[in-house]
Image (cartoon, rainbow, N blue to C red):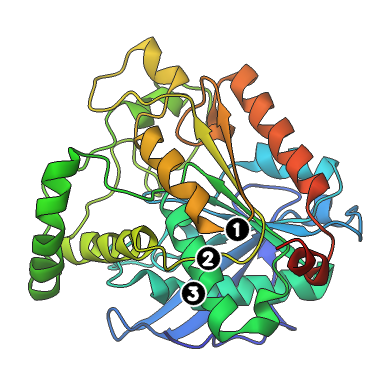
């Protein structure tokens, strides 16, 4: 892992692509262990909403998924209206942070994302006292590993985490489990030998067309940063996913903080778009999420949102409101300090 190469007390905040009320700052990360070249992350803040934040409430930190970036300003608006400061991080080679020639979302180790997550945590905690990451899909795989790393190796920063919200985290490979069991050792071996081998398939199927305003959805986003069919994927990246999931399956990951997982009531996988895709997770197997999410913390809670999409906050209105309400109620009940968290173990 590289160290953050930015003075967090003097970030250069500029207008963000989301428009008035939002700002972004580049976090230089120095030399990247994946490529040997300099990389960056981009921190986004809801500046207008944060100015009215309740000082007793933790900052929320959105962590995006694969083939994704932060565009869900309606989520920021909902929580800042409740008094929660709101930030989001576009990870290295993702969204706002990707520069020309970089392979979208490519990494050989999920731990390589830890420096920018820690930098975002340090900045937001310095402003607001504590932080609750809200991590989606692949972000929901990375964030628990990062929290576990902080718990083991950086207790001062771990103490700044008040809790964690996982939004349909990617905790297992969503394919036939016998085939997955046979494939995992092969993925580890070939992924190390041929990391840049492009993977066949891997398209997002019905998901992209179910959410974008140009197709069947209501959401506007940059389809270069978030293509409707997803970005190209590589074998080395799949090995990194595989090894991260294996770590969770061994029971080696403990966020050390109260952890809420939001998940749809059912999946709709491997099918073309139909109206059924508007009320299901079309990307991941929800039964796998419900299996592994309770293992991530001694204080884990799983909330099933009937009719939710893969990103529960991009669901149709009823399921979306249920997800918002469940998260708000959970946040209100999370202990205010690290010492209170520890006393509830």
Marks 2 and 3 sit apart, C-alpha to C-alpha, by 16 Å
The residue positioned 44% from the left and 87% from the top of the image is 2
In this view, the residue in front, 84 or 339, is: 339
Mark 1 burial class by Cα count in 10 Å: few <14, some 14-19, many 20+: some
Name the one closer to the observer, 67 or 13: 67
The residue indicated by pointer 2 is 254
Badge 1 is on which residue?
Answer: 298
Q: Nearer the viewer, mark 1 or mark 3?
A: 1
Calculate the distance from the C-alpha at mark 2 to the C-alpha at mark 1: 8 Å
The reply to whether residue 104 is visible in this rendering is: no
Q: Nearer the viewer, residue 264 or 237?
A: 264
Cα–Cα span, label 1 and label 3? 22 Å
Location of residue 88 by image quarter: bottom right
Judge whether 259 appears above or below 279 on screen.
Answer: below
Q: Quick check: marks 2 and 1 in contact, CB under 8 Å?
A: yes
The circle drawn on residue 114 is 3
Q: Are marks 1 and 3 in contact (CB under 8 Å)?
A: no
Label whose residue precedes the other's in the sequence (2 or 3): 3
Q: Nearer the viewer, mark 2 or mark 3?
A: 2
């Amino acid at each position: 892992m590289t160290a953050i190469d930015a003075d967090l007390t003097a970030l250069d905040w500029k207008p963000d692509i989301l428009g008035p009320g939002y700002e972004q700052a580049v976090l230089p990360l120095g030399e990247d262990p994946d490529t040997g070249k300099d990389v960056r992350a981009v921190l986004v803040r809801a500046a207008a909403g944060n100015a009215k934040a309740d000082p007793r409430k933790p900052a929320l930190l959105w962590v995006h998924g694969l083939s994704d970036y932060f565009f869900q300003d309606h989520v920021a608006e909902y929580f800042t209206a409740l008094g929660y400061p709101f930030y989001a991080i576009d990870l290295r080679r993702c969204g706002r942070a990707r520069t020309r020639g970089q392979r979208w979302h490519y990494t050989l180790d999920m731990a390589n994302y830890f420096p920018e997550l820690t930098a975002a945590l340090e900045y937001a905690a310095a402003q607001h006292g504590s932080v609750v990451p809200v991590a989606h899909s692949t972000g929901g795989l990375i964030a628990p590993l990062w929290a576990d790393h902080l718990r083991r190796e950086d207790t001062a920063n771990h103490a700044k985490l008040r809790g964690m919200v996982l939004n349909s985290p990617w905790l297992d490979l969503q394919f036939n489990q016998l085939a997955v069991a046979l494939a995992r050792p092969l993925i580890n071996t070939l992924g190390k030998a041929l990391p840049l081998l492009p993977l066949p398939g891997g398209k997002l199927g019905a998901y992209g067309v179910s959410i974008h305003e140009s197709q069947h959805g209501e959401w506007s986003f940059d389809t270069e940063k978030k293509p409707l069919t997803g970005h190209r994927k590589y074998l080395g990246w799949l090995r990194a996913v595989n090894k991260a999931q294996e770590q969770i399956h061994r029971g080696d990951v403990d966020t050390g903080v109260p952890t809420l997982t939001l998940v749809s009531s059912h999946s709709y996988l491997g099918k073309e778009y139909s109206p059924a895709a508007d009320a299901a997770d079309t990307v991941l197997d929800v039964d796998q999420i419900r299996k592994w999410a309770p293992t991530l913390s001694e204080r884990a809670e799983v909330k099933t949102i009937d009719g939710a999409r893969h990103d529960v906050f991009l669901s149709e209105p009823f399921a979306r409101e249920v997800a918002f309400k469940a998260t708000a109620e959970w946040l209100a009940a999370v202990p205010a300090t690290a010492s209170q968290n520890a006393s509830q173990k």
